[in-house]
């Protein structure tokens, strides 16, 4: 049974792990199929990838082609949001429901403390600045002349697509883009990667290991080689947030803040969002910014973990009295 597998996993020794893994065999519907959770997660990934990237992406291409223009961008944004809901969120919820009767418990839909939320928000903004610095250094890596034109064209196409999707001129349009690019993906993708995928890989790799594996898959799933490492880092952090807080809401908040801050930054500064250009800061300036932002991000992580531990102690003391 799934409970026995998880009890043997290394992550189960973490304080509060029992709060995250308290699922009985009666709750686990698909265990009768004798299918290992990690295999189920891989099957789910393949199925949802086909639905979202192939079916959903194919429909978008048939409707709008490859050109993202000001004339069709609103329709593409709407199609993107609908595609996330129809081809990613709903199939994920159905797969979770097939696996367990208690969806909210399985995905760890539990509240987080106010102080934890504050540290998460500040930490994500700091981490975002650190990763932007990484992209500056990544752009310094020389590319062989034989493939440079192809790489440059690919980068420019991805940059143009994102720029068209998120650059807006009015506040109402900005709010709509935040809904499409920040809120809906934060909820949909976290339910998939942290709610379904990470949850199942925990049975093989433990709580922390499942977070790392799901984070790597999260980055690969976005099919963007130029932001692979930052996405991998963010994906792992999102997973570890769930591991430490015992709540998927921590990851949803972090994901929303990361995307939302990027959108707002582009709205007010109208700057490049993926690719450094000639006006980028110097090596020394970038290094200093990375050191400072990295320090703030780590400090926020430490304070967040302490806040979680304090809230747990308070809850235990209340139960004693």
Image: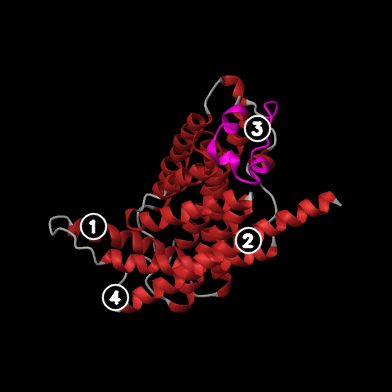
Percent position of residue 251, x then y: 57, 54
Please give the residue where the numbered disc 4 appears in the rendered image: 283
* Gap in angstroms between the C-alphas marked 1 and 4: 23 Å
- Residue with the mark numbered 1: 151
Q: CA distance from mark 3 to mark 2?
A: 32 Å
| Foreground of the two, 303 or 93 | 303
What secondary structure is found at the residue carrying circle 1?
helix
Q: Position of residue 96 (x, y in %)?
A: 61, 36
Q: Which residues are magenta?
A: 4-27
**Numbered circle sitting on residue 200:** none
Say which quarter of the image contains residue 147: bottom left
Quadrant assignment, res 227? bottom left
- Where is mark 2, residue-wise? 306
| Residue found at the very far left of the displayed protein | 146
The foreground one among 286 and 171 is 286
Q: Residue at x 53, y 38 (%)?
A: 10
Give neighbour class at mark 4: few <14, some 14-19, many 20+ (Cα, 10 Å).
Answer: few
Neighbour tally class for label 3: few under 14, some 14-19, many 20 plus, Cα within 10 Å: many
The numbered disc on residue 100 is 3
Residue 263 can be seen in this image: no
Mark 3 vs mark 2: give the one in front: 2
Earlier residue among tags 3 and 4: 3
For marks 1 and 4, the one nearer the N-term is 1
Colour scheme shown: secondary structure
Q: Secondary structure at mark 3?
A: loop
Q: Earlier in the sequence, mark 1 or mark 3?
A: 3
């Amino acid at each position: 049974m799934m409970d026995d597998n998880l009890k043997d996993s290394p992550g189960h020794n973490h304080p509060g792990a029992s709060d995250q893994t308290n699922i009985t065999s009666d709750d686990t519907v698909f265990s009768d199929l004798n299918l290992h959770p990690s295999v189920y997660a891989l099957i789910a990934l393949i199925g949802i990838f086909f639905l979202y990237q192939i079916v959903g992406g194919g429909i978008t291409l048939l409707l709008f082609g490859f050109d993202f223009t000001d004339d069709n961008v609103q329709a593409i944004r709407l199609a993107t949001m609908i595609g996330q809901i129809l081809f990613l969120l709903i199939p994920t919820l159905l797969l979770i429901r097939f696996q367990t009767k208690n969806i909210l418990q399985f995905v760890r839909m539990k509240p987080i403390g106010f102080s934890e939320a504050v540290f998460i928000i500040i930490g994500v903004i700091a981490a975002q600045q650190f990763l932007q610095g990484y992209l500056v250094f990544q752009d310094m890596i020389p590319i062989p002349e034989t493939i440079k034109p192809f790489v440059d064209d690919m980068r420019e196409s991805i940059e143009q697509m994102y720029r068209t999707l998120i650059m807006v001129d009015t506040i109402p349009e900005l709010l709509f883009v935040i809904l499409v690019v920040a809120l809906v993906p934060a909820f949909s993708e976290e339910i998939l990667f942290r709610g379904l995928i990470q949850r199942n890989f925990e049975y093989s790799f433990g709580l922390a290991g499942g977070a790392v594996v799901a984070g790597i898959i999260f980055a690969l799933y976005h099919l963007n080689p130029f932001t692979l490492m930052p996405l991998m880092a963010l994906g792992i952090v999102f997973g570890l947030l769930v591991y430490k807080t015992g709540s998927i809401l921590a990851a949803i908040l972090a994901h929303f803040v990361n995307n939302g801050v990027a959108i707002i930054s582009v709205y007010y500064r109208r700057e490049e969002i993926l690719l450094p250009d000639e006006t980028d800061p110097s090596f020394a300036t970038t290094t200093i910014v990375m050191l400072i932002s990295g320090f703030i991000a780590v400090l926020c992580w430490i304070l967040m973990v302490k806040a979680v531990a304090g809230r747990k102690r308070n809850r235990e003391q209340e139960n004693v009295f």
